[in-house]
Structures are given as C-alpha cells and as structure tokens.
Image (cartoon, coloured by chain):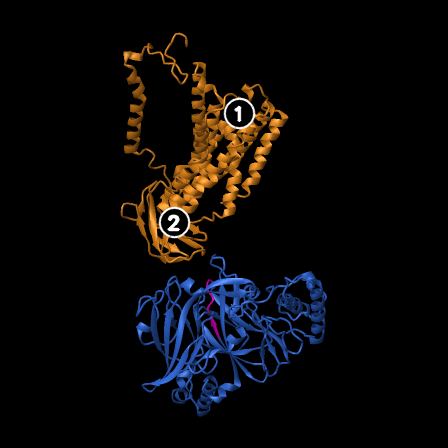
Amino acid sequence: MPSIDYDSAADVTERLEQRLVESLTGESSVSRRTVLGGLGVAGGAAVGLGSSRASASSDHEDEDEHGNFGAVGEYRDLDFDPHEFLTAFNTGDSGQDNVPQQVYEEDGRTVREFEFTAVDTTITIAPGVEFQAWAYNGQVPGPTIRAVEGDLFRVKFTNLGRHAHTIHPHLKNLNPRMDGIPQNGPGVLDTGESFTYEWIAQPAGTHFYHCHSLPLKEHIHRGLYGTIIVDPDPERVRENPRDYVNYPGPITDDLRTQLVEEAKSRNHEYAENDAVNEMVMVMNSFDTNFDGGNEVYAANTRAFGYGVGDTDGNGNWTAGETKRPIQIDKNERQRVYLSNATEFDLINSFHTHSQFFDYYDHGTTLTPTRKTVDTIMQTQAQRGIIEIDYSDHEPGLYMFHAHQSEFAELGWMSFFEVV
Amino acid sequence: MADKTQNSTTDGGVAAENERTQPLGLPRWVSALLPIVLLVLVLGVFAFTSPLAGVQSGEPLPDVTVTHTTLPSDETVVLHVTNNGPESVTISQVLVDEAYWNFRVEGAGGDQTLAPMESARIVIPYHWNPGWDLEVALVLSDGATFHNTIVAPSQSPGFSLSLLGTLAIIGLFVGVIPVALGMLWFPYIKTMSDRWLHAVLLFAAGVLGFLAFDAGFEAFELAERVPGAYEGNLLVVFGIFGALLLVQAISAWREGRVVAGDSRASSGLWIAYLVAVGIGLHNLAEGLAIGSSFALGRVSLGAFLVIGFMLHNVTEGPAVVAPVARGKRPSIKHFAALGVIAGAPVILGGWIGSLAYSPTIGAFFLAIGVGAILQVNWEIARMVRDAGGRVASATNLLAFLLGLGVMYVTDLFVAL
C-alpha cells in the first residue's frame, strides 16, 4: 500500500525527537516515556507510514496542515501486552502464568484443566483511557484455551467479582448442566462461589466463550469473553473426512491426504503446526459513557495497539513502544483465529490491505468457506480462521482493520510489518 | 360608609350590609347557594347525556412521569412514577438498559394500572453498578414508552437517625453558624450614618434579590420534573404570589396595629423578623436541596461546598440585623430568635428533603421562598423611605448591585 522510505522516515523521526527533547529540556516533570510517547505519534505521522493518516503519502511536508487521527500518547498499563496475547495459547501443558493449568489422562481421554477466576478490574483501552472491566483471570479478552478434538476441557471457575457470572462455551455440549446459563446446572455463580465446567472439545474449529449472566449486554461487553481453539485430530480426519468439508463430491485420496495435512498444520501437537504463525484476535469494543454505543474499538482490547509507532527503519521498534505493528516473517504462513465480541454494533469486519486470504468460517472445515477474499464480516460470537500468505510481498507495512471506517478510526486499525 | 359600620375588622375590611332585600323575598343563603345547585344540575345532565360524545376524536395520549428514583440497595432500583394523563395507564413491561427486566408495582392497589393522578413505585431487582448510568424505560399496555436515565447511580441513604444527625450538623454549618456570624456585624452597623445604614439595607436587598432569582430559576427548573397534571410552573407562580401576598397581608395587619397604637409593631424589629422569615424560607429550600441530594444518593458535600455555603450565607446575617440598627437595641433573645428563624430551616429542609422528597414539594418550597423574599425587599424599600432616605440614591443602587455581585461570586462556590 504505502510507498515507504525508511531512511527518510528515520531522518524525520530523529529530527523531531531532537526538537522535542530540546523543547522539553529542564522540565523534570516530563518523563522520558512521555517524550517517547509524543514521538511515537509524531514519528509515525511524520514519516507518512499511514498509521495515523487517512492518506498514506510519502510526501511528509503537509502533515500538520491536515491533522492526523490516532490515539495520542502511550499505554502505561503494562499488565496486558496485546503482542503477547496474540500467541498466548493455554493448552494445559503450557500457557500463561495467570492461568493455572494442567493436562492429564482420565478414562482414556486427555483432560486439559484450567483455573478461571472472574474479577472486577480496570483495563486500559486507549492511551490514558481506563475502563472498568469484568475479566476472566484479570485480562480482556480472557485467556485463549486450546485442546485437541475429543479432549475434555475442565474449567474450575471461581467468581470473585461483585456480580454473578458464568462461563458459556460455544461448543457442542451434550450436558445442559455445563452450558453456563442462569437457568441450567449451577446457574449463575454469586461472589465467592465456584463450579467446575466440563466440556468435550468438539467440533474442531475456533470457538467463543463468554459469561451468560444477565444483563447479557453488560456481562459481555465488560470483558467476559475469550477464544476456545479445538485442533482437528488428523486421525479422525482421515476416517471421517466428510465432517471437515462443505463439499458434496467424492472424497478422493488426494483430498483425504490434503485434509489430513491441513489438520496437522492446525494441530498444536504436530510439528507441521510449528511452521505456521498463529495469532488470536478478538474484535472488541467498549462503551465508556453508557450510551449504548462504543467509544473504542480494537482487535484485542487496545485501540491502535497494533498501529505504527516509532521505528529505526529496519523493523526494530523503539523499546517500550506500546503501539507497534505485528511483525511477521514473510516466509511463514500466517493464521489468525478471529472472533467478534463487539456489543451494540451488528457486525464487525476484518480487511487486509494489498492482500487476499482464505477464510474458514468457525474454523470447522479444513477447506476454506470463502476463498481469496480481502474482507469478511462477523456478527457477535461468530469466528473463523484466516490464512494469509505474504511470501510474494515486498517487506514493509501492510494495514489490516475493520472496514467500518468508523471502527477503524476509533481504534480498530492495525498493521502487519512483513520482514 | 366606613364611619357608619363601626365593626371594622382587623384585616381592614368592613362588614357587608345585611339589610339588602333579596329577590322574591328569599333568604340570603338561598341566593348564595342557587348558582351552585344549578351548576351541579347542569354537570349532571352533561355527564349522563354526553352531548359531546360525537365530538371526541382519537384517544387522549398517555403521560407518565418518573418524578425521581431511589436506590435503596445495590440490588434494587425504585422508580417513583405518576400518571399525568386523563386515562388510566397500565405499566406492562419495564426495560433496563434496553433489556426486558422483571419488576413489581407497589402502591397502585395491587395491580399495574395507574388511575389518572395516581402515583406508584416501580421496584426493579437489578444489580446496578455505582457510577454506571442506567436507562430505564416503562412500556405501557399500548406500547408507548417513557424513558428515564439514572445518571451515575449511587445508593440512597434511606432513613436513619444518623442521617438526620448528619443533616442537622450540615444545616448547623451551612445555615445557623454563618447567619449568626453575619449578625455579629450588628455593633458596627449600629455606628453607621443613615446614609451607610441605608446602603447596608440595600446591600441586603441585593443579597435577597439574588436569592430570589436563584431560587426562582431553580423552582422553574424543578417544575419541569413535576408531574404534568400538577402544572409545575403554575404551582411555582402560585407559591411565589401566595407567599408574597400572605406576608404582605401580615405586614398590612401590622400597620393596622401601628395605627391602633401598638408600639411594638412599629419597630424595626418587626422588619427584622420578616427578613429572617424570608431568609429562613429560602434556607429551607436550600436545606431541601441538600436533603434531597442525600435522598437521591447524589451528594458530594465536600469541605469546599460547605465553605461555599458558609460564605454565601454569612451575608444573610447583616441583612437580618440591619433593620434594628436604629432605636433601642433589642434583647439578646430576639437576636437568638432571628438567627434561628433565618438559619435553622436549613436543618428542617434537609430533613424534609431527605425523607419526603419530591420535585413538587421542592418546587413549591422554593417558590414560597421567592415570594417571601420579594415581600421583604418591598419592606426594606419602605423602611428606607420612611426613615427619610432615598431608595434609589447612587450609594444605595451601588450597594444593591454589590449585594447581587457578592452573592454571584459566592454562589460559584456552591454547586450542588
């Protein structure tokens, strides 16, 4: 998309940095972080990388006349790192520190056990903008949990929030007690109460979980949602290939092999999976003023979290930079587990610049449900897998964002930096 | 004629002649009652024959007002509603933040239907969050909706002795103490020349004039939340004129006493009491505002606000005592009484406001305060004139302006 002149970008950035630092010299109240934050914006805007500019032009003389969009300042709350979140998969044997977990065999089934705790907390959704959230294990989106088809998720849930909560999984769940709704099983869990949910990991795909307490709007949009990934079992795929295609024709041996290969690339227990760079993105939004409309949109909570900040021009972003693109290796296959938790708006969308991708709605098939598209949309709780290949592309910045321009300008605006 | 009818009444009126002849030789009371009886007859005929039945087109529109909301616990929201419309309305459903929610209607005779002018409480079990706005909508049986937003909800205190104690202490600080302090200017005011004394009186009139506008605007603002059937604006007008005319009537009665030779009635002390009553009524309204803020759980009575009220109210002290600066100094008992009458109603108002809050009561009390103040200003002008001064002298006008100005500035400190 943009014509990028990294050398000139670095020059301008350095000049601006010098000027800003000089102008701030002697003001002890201004921290280095503040200076850098300002620079991030100034730098990004000045080099015309398009992060915070409506028009991505390399002509950087007219920046100030037109003004820029983009959130001002840096994120100071470092409890949540959207870049770490992208690849934080909790499988039972490995995962995040704040998600106690283990994996064991029971009755011939692999059990992946997680401890979930609902808490009231404050998260940062835009630089300097805080949001009173209800969160699983203190984070929004909640932890991503992952299993292989047929495994058992055992989620020991304790509610420490001041409201009653549940966990409702979007899985094929055969026991109504485990559905996590007020009317079934334990119902809502009041403050201090616990319950252990057990869900069979099925069907293969990318799924959604959320609190189902009432009022639902409040409980979802305050932050109680997350992603469940169920990896397809290649052996099961080999035996039941029809379950994994939306295709009525004959299953040839080639197709069967192709499906099994695809299943292996999806399954975190297979080496084929290591060749793929997998990322979890939850499109979410926040109503900060109780008017039933969102003020902030993002992929993974933070407005412009994957936007452009300050670069040395060689793909190395200033240390401590909180708004920076997602760096990807052009020779690696990219896979995004995308879901939509947006409340109040009917749909959200995902659009890539200068790129087309394959989309697997709900991730339940191993052949794309939409092939070669650059925009997909999802309603709330809809999810899917996006597979992107940047091997043909020149290194540089490639934008992706919601193609509701309103959402994009309110924070859901991101970049891949292909290196 | 006044000379002939000796029994002049205390209100200055005269007894009517009772010698007039009645038509057809009927007794007087018959001719007094006849029009009323005939009116009842006509109304009865109208009601039973409905001669205008064909004229009516369409249904009258339903009109429901949420006068105020209380949050007795963090699991409960209570809406106080009144049906203003000419027809009964049935509250069939309640929406909280655009979600149907369960509720019950209390105080409407066991059902969900409100007769015209009937009020009720809608009790909603809802786990609300402090500070998170709630939008509540009433859905009537015909699908009409009435919305009410509870901005930044916080728990209502409910009734408790400690709340009454707290309000008494607040009232003491914002009402009684500043007025008493202001009255300590009395010895100084006493030494002033007539010219400056009149200026002080006009300053007091300025202070009161400001309060009249302040309370008047507030009364009309509050009147918007008065259920439509009660005609909030007209209620305020009635309150203002009612108080003005009532106090003026008392004043006129006093003059009758002066003419009759009652020396006590002629003293400045009388005016001082009138001023104290006027200010007291104003402070009652101020107390109502504080108390209702408590009742609605919307109170941030920080030290700053209390200081603001004190600065604001300290100017009311000299206004009370200026009228007694000439002549014999009244006994200390009178000073105490003046201070209590002017200042203590803050406490009373606080209690009323916290226990029985409604916009109707609030607007009406504010209006009464305005009327009383207007009458006092009238009285002060006369006092200056009677003492041989010119009300509209340059000094006096500037003093009046200063009174307005000081109140404006100190009012900036008071934002409830």
Write down the chain letter for disc 1.
Answer: B
At 57% from the left and 18% from the top, the residue drawn is B388
Q: Which chain is orange?
A: B
Dot 1 amino acid type: Ala
Q: Given the current orientation, which residue lies at the most extreme top position?
A: B4
Number of other residues with Cα within 10 Å of mark 2, as a class: few under 14, some 14 to 19, many 20 or more: some
Residue A112 picture quarter? bottom left
Residue at which label 1 appears: B325
Q: Is A171 inside the magenta-drawn segment?
A: no
What percent of the width, then of the height, locates residue A295?
52, 61
Question: Do tags 2 and 1 sit on the same chain?
Answer: yes
Q: Colour of chain A?
A: blue
Dot 2 amino acid type: Pro
Label 1 SS: loop
Classify B379 as above or below A368.
above
Contact, mark 2 vs mark 1 (Cβ under 8 Å): no
Classify B236 as above or below A317.
above
Q: Does residue B144 appear in this view? A: no
Residue at which label 2 appears: B157
Classify A380 as above or below B242.
below
Label 2 SS: loop
What percent of the width, then of the height, locates residue B382?
53, 22
Write down the chain letter for disc 2.
Answer: B
Q: Give the position of the N terminus of chain B as an image quadrant.
A: top left
Number of other residues with Cα within 10 Å of mark 1, as a class: few under 14, some 14 to 19, many 20 or more: many
Q: Which residues are magenta?
A: A338-344
